Amino acid sequence: MLPAAAAPALDAMTSTGGFLLVLSIVVPVTGVLLAFILGDQYERLVACAIVPFGLAIAAAIVVALPQGNGPVVYVLGAWPPPLGIALRADGLSAVMLAATAVVICAVAAFAAADFSITETRVSFTFWILLLAIWGALNTIFLGGDLFTLYVALELLTFAAVPLVCLDGRGETLRAAIRYLLFALLGSVLYLLGTTLLYGLYGTLDIVLLGRRIDTQPAAVVAAALMTTGLLAKTALVPLHLWLPPAHAGAPAAASAILSGLVVKGSFFIIVRLWFNVMPGLPGFIATQLLAGLGGVAIVLGSVVALRQERLKLLIAYSTLAQIGYLFLMFPLAFGASGRLESSGALAGGLLQAISHATAKAAMFLAAGSIYATLGQDRILGLGGVGRILPISVLAFALSGLALMGLPPGGAYLAKELLLQAAAEKEQWWWAVVLQAGGVFTGAYVVLVLAHALTAAKEPITPDSSAPRIRELATLALALCSLMLGLVPWEAYLSIPNGVPSDKFGIGALFKMLLPLLGGTGVAILLAPSKLPSWRRSGWNELMPVISSVRRGSLASSAIVEAGDKFLRQWPIACISVLTLAALFGVSMLGAH
Amino acid sequence: MTSGATVFGLCAAVAVGLGLYGLITNPQPLRKIIAFNVLGSGVFLLFGVVGRRGAAAGIGNDPVPQALVITGVVVAFAATALAIALLLRLFQKTGTTTLCSDVRPSACSDPSGD
């Protein structure tokens, strides 16, 4: 039954530099243990020592990868798979490792100035959980078998949930419990699928499983259960009940980690599952279904984001929309052979994930500085903040532009790659969704900036001045997201048609105007708050037309918001989980 | 031997079904946590059945699923402990354990006295 000598030398042997993979997991975990032992005076010191070390390890892995042929592998205890466990770093993992390290660094720099004066319990918890999340994420990116990924996913959840209720208010505790319970439902479904796969094939190693997997019904059931479980943890609409309160209630540094990094963990496992474990299993309809949910997420997340009164809730809903954007790559990577191929679309999807990680973290950090200075974060009350916190508002604007797809940002490159793939596969409808996603992103960024750049109604007396290092860390992260397009991705991601080279030309400028102008239009139509006064001066003759159209579109956006409220009820969300699992199962079965 | 494994497999399915039902319908968080444990037990039982059937490797009694189940049990235990700790803190903080504060109060009043 066992294919003799199936394990090739490359995947089952520790390669040079393999110890780096172990270090990248062990170092953050060591930090957690050290902080526990040394107690609550030294946790910042430990974290500040560990963070640069971890960044150096991630950089070393990134450098080591293109030199060897194939992935960097470490086989634990020299037991080869299927019995042993392997850690593997391919291009995808290296890119995610590096992005995670950069975001953690920036957030740590921000938090070092943020939690230094607040109570020690919060600070102690935050630093330990930050390192724990880092360790768990690295395990997810490097784990070579599905059960290791399960354990890493649980570690990630257990570290992320307490971050939600760091301040210990009843409201955030409720958000944390809902998050934990829903995530547990998702992980049980994932574990159930893992059990079935082990029963069928006798291994959980990703490479071996990728070779052995076939299209029998039990494998399809396993795939459907695992996909749905992971979607529940990634908060793809309609499984998003936990995300808005959890991400909006946490302190800024914690929100940045939760929104930028934690949801990418389960997303990465979905990518592994669909592209590496079972590329031939999902079939055309399942990929369309997945991206369809993504499209719904873009519309629902963006429309509800525009209706929020608080800045942090707006950013949380924008995360929902951006998560939807990540899933658009699946049908575009579906090749003519009936399998998912690691093509430009996969590279685009991953780039989108990275640029969202950096840009969204920067947005939450900027919102945190604004909240700390103003003492509130109502969008209508943002007037004058551009004068007090120019760097934070600039960072918010830059990360917003990066998310919209301004060249040379990572999201711009991602969008170009995905549009290329859509044209190649002749699936024009996804090109429409991609462009609409950019326009919607433009809408809520313009909305926030329009309020932030107006003059204050009454002079603001800042509660406290934001330390400069906090603002600079935010700005650095935003700039990083905006510069991602200049990195030579070809060494790590498979980009068959090459990277679009036109990053600074007239064409690129024009592409940038669409989300900006379209976004302004959408913001005027869909945001229920009164338009800022300076906007109205030259528009008097147009006002009746605009306001009648606006009334209609506001009514429809109210319906979308009601739909969001409906979907976020616990029983509805759970039934959606089961329905989605059934839909995925049926569509995958139908493909064979 | 096959029939024994089948019986256990069916038990696992029943436990998973019961757990799912409880998780969806019970509004009280503590009951949700217990339902999650029932659901998890079903999955662990399935792991046992898989090990008993010798997986696909054709071995009489595969030990790997047992190792996986032990890990799974530890993870589920940790999850339960974390959930209970959060719930206790919520109760100390607010005096209730209901999860929905923003929806109609009548729909999610604490049904502990049923």
Image: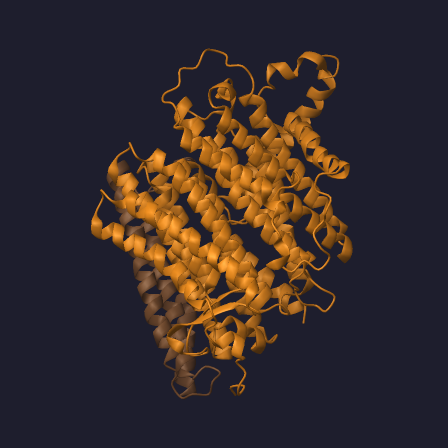
Chain colours: A orange, B brown
Identify the image quadrant of residue A484.
top right
Nearest to the observer: residue A95 or residue B44? A95
Above-or-below relation of A271 to A380: below
Above-or-below relation of A484 to A72: above
Nearest to the observer: residue A477 or residue A216? A477
Residue at image point 46% right, 45% down = A103
Residue at image point 57% right, 26% down = A449
Residue at image point 40% right, 74% down = B47
Q: Position of residue A134 (x, y in %)?
A: 40, 52
Q: Is residue A558 left or right of residue A56?
A: right
Q: Position of residue A569 (x, y in %)?
A: 47, 44
Identify the image quadrant of residue B94.
top left
Query: Could you tell me if residue A288 is visible in this image?
Result: no
Identify the image quadrant of residue A439.
top right
Nearest to the observer: residue A59 or residue A110? A59
Q: Position of residue B109 (x, y in %)?
A: 35, 40
